[in-house]
Image: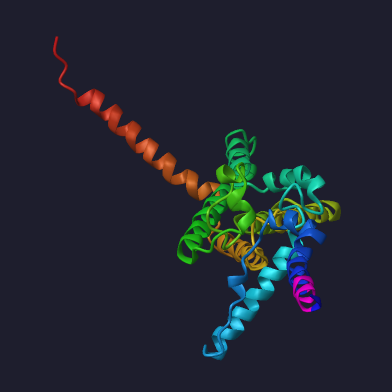
Amino acid sequence: MSLAASRRNSCRAVVCGSRAPSEAHPGRRRAASCPYFSPEDFSVSLNQPMLAIALRFLLAVDLWLSKRLGVCACEESSWGSIRPLVRLVEFSGHVVPWLVGTVYTLLRGESAAEQEVMLNLSLALILDLLLVRTVKTLVRRRTPAPNRSDILSAFFVERYSFPSGHASRAALCARFFLAQLADTASTRVLVVGWAVLVSLSRLLLARHYVTDVAFGLAMGYCQYSLVEQFWVSWDCLQDPLLLRLRESLDQAYAGLWTADWKH
C-alpha cells in the first residue's frame, strides 16, 4: 500500500509541476499575445562559417534591442497609454503631408527664392521615396510581428521594413532645413528634436528594427549631399520654359499670317 501511494504522489507532483509555470505566471500569456519575434530567429549552427555566426549574433542583438524599445507596440504594452501620442509623431513624418505641403507652398510661393527651395525639397522627397522603395524591394525584410496583426497597420504600414522611410525622410528634411531655412539656434534644436522623435517613434511602435532606423538615418543624411550637388535653380528651370513658350507663340503668330484664308 505504501509503494502504490508513493507512486500516486510522484505522478501528482509531475502533473502539478507541469501546470505550475502557466498558472503561476498569467502575465506571460498576455505578453505572448503581442509577439515580436520567434525563437527560430536565434538558431545558430556550429557548422556555419564564422561570418554567418557573427551576422546571426548581430541579428540577435538587433532583435533583442528592438524588442526592448518596442514599449508602445500594443495597447497591452508597458507604455501603451501614450501610443496615440506616439502615432501622432509618427504621422508628422509621413510622406503624404510632406509632399502635399511642399507642393502647396511651391504653387503659392510669393518669391522666386521660396519657390526654388520648395522645388528642390519636392524633388528631394520624391528621390527619397524612390530610393527607399527600391532598397525595400531588394532586401525584402519583413516588418516586426506586431504590425502583421494590427488591423489599422494593414492600411498604413508597409510590408517591408528595411530601411525606415520615416527615418530617412526625417534625416533628409532635417538636414535640408538646417542648411536652407533654419537660421536661429532654437529652430535648429526643434528641427533636430523632431527628427529624433520621428525616428524613435518607429522603434517605440515596433514598426522597424534598430538597424532599419539606423540605415534610414544614414541614407537620408547622404541624400541631401546628392540634392545639394544637383541643386536646381529657379532661373535655370524658368529659362527653357520661357524659351519654348516664345517659340510656340512665334510659330503660332507666323501661322496666322501665312494661312490661306478662304472667303
Residue at the extreme top of the image, as rendered: 263
At a point 25% along the width and 23% down the height, the residue shown is: 256
- Quadrant that contains the C terminus: top left
Report the magenta stretch's main SS: helix
Picture layout, residue 167 above or below residue 9: above
Whole-percent x, y for residue 101 in the image: 63, 39
**Looking at the image, which is closer to me, 26 or 126?**
26
Picture layout, residue 151 above or below residue 23: above
- Quadrant that contains the N terminus: bottom right
**Looking at the image, which is closer to me, 241 or 196?**
196
At a point 18% along the width and 23% down the height, the residue shown is: 259
Whole-percent x, y for residue 100 in the image: 59, 38
Determine which quarter of the picture holds residue 217.
bottom right
Determine which quarter of the picture holds residue 219.
bottom right
Whole-percent x, y for residue 190 in the image: 81, 52
**Looking at the image, which is closer to me, 139 or 43?**
43
Picture layout, residue 219 above or below residue 55: above
At a point 64% along the width and 43% down the height, the residue shown is: 114
Picture layout, residue 40 above or below residue 32: below
Residue at the extreme right of the image, as rendered: 186
Whether residue 179 is visible, yes or no, is no
Q: Is 137 displayed left or right of 256 in the figure?
A: right
- Residue bounds of the magenta highlight: 3-9
**Looking at the image, which is closer to me, 61 or 259?**
61
At a point 46% along the width and 65% down the height, the residue shown is: 138
